[in-house]
Image (tube, grey):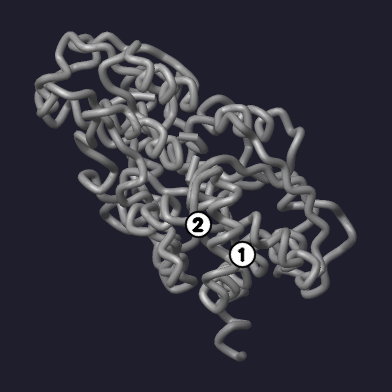
Amino acid sequence: MKLRSLLSSLLLFIATLTLTISCTNPATNVETKPPVASTPDKVQVRLGFSAWPGWFPWQVSQEQDIFKQNNVDVDLKWFDGYLESISTLTAGQIDANSQTLGDTVSSVAGGADQVIVLTNDNSTGNDKIIVRKGINSIADLKGKKVAAEEGTVDHFLLLLGLQKSGLTPKDIEFVPLETGKAATAFVGGQVDAVAVFAPFTTQALKLAGSKELFSSKDFPGSISDHLVFTRKFVDAHPDQVQAMVDSWFATLDYIKANPAKANEILAKRAGVSLDEYKQYADGTKIFTIEENLKAFEDGKDRTSLKFAAREMSKFLFDIGLAKSTPDVDKLFDDRFVKAYAQKAKKA
């Protein structure tokens, strides 16, 4: 369920992997592009994904031959480190990646040309700030060592919490660590608090007396997760992109119809027990096709991806992480969810 670089309104869209499956994602019209072809060409799609409940379903897609059923050849690449997956997409070494809206806007701010074609989910509690015994409020974090993977959404979540309580980043001793190492450092007593996402939340909570201080549930719409392609690939192979979107929804159907087998695959990919994995259900909201369509629409709050992206873009510029305000008007392409919706309606 992880990328995932600072303060207020940047965490803007969120996730929950309930295996009954529910989903939200509206789209942006691309008037200058041709319609999606109906028969995929024979090009391999190199797709990256990493540890986050909203992305584990890709493992089901692979193991249950759902990609093959949709006539798409996929090289599914697992990344132990979420940020590595982001940099690999930016370098053009993969064609698509599973990443957050905030991280995608950051990549665009850095010069990447990427396209969001699908919303996987919103985080509704699976991103957490976990603290040791004796810390009972956000105010108690003042002067404490807090670890997180710098620049990820959990770092953003931490900063949102600080801001809400009237604190600033200077009020804590920030310890930048890769998410897995951050969880390990917390359990080892090297830091007082940690910002992590599932399944690393399970690891962090194994420290005796530890507890959740706050989570993405407290900041609705702050973290959303997506299927992101390079624009080069979308322009060259729209039929393959369509096949990937179709495969995603077919996978959700499979999970709903076969929860026992699906949960087994999901838990194994997460590296946790089946019972532990079930605890993630309420923390990730998987978007339906209807919710996808709605999310791509323009709007005046964070339920709209366009609104959220503009807010993030401005924020990156305001805090100095972007030399100019990133142009996000071309970031979204809703052709593919619209095409799937039409096919589903006819079916």
Which badge, 1 or 2, comes first in the chain's sequence?
A: 2
Q: Say whether residue 34 is visible.
A: no
User: Where does residue 193 sit, x and y in percent of width and height?
Assistant: 27, 22
Q: Nearer the viewer, residue 62 or 304?
A: 62
Left/right of residue 235 with respect to residue 169 in the rendered view: right
Residue at image position (22%, 9%) is 170
Left/right of residue 301 with respect to residue 105 in the rendered view: left
Specify the farthest residue to the right: 42
Residue at image position (69%, 65%) is 242
Please tell me the numbered disc located at residue 120: 2
Q: Which residue is mark 1?
A: 248
Residue at image position (24%, 30%) is 210
- SS of the residue under disc 2: strand
Which three-letter amino acid code belongs to the residue tagged 1?
Trp
Which three-letter amino acid code belongs to the residue tagged 2?
Asn
Q: CA distance from mark 1 to mark 2?
A: 9 Å
- SS of the residue under disc 1: helix
Q: Say whether residue 12 is visible.
A: yes
Residue at image position (37%, 12%) is 175
Total number of numbered labels?
2
Left/right of residue 172 with respect to residue 83 in the rendered view: left
Vertical placement of residue 328 versus 153, above or below? below
Task: State yes or no: discs 1 and 2 in contact (Cβ < 8 Å).
Answer: yes
User: Where does residue 235 sit, x and y in percent of width and height?
Assistant: 74, 52
Vertical placement of residue 319 versus 221, above or below? above
Q: Quadrant of the C terminus?
A: bottom right
Vertical placement of residue 285 versus 308, above or below? below
User: Where does residue 54 sit, x and y in percent of width and height?
Assistant: 49, 53
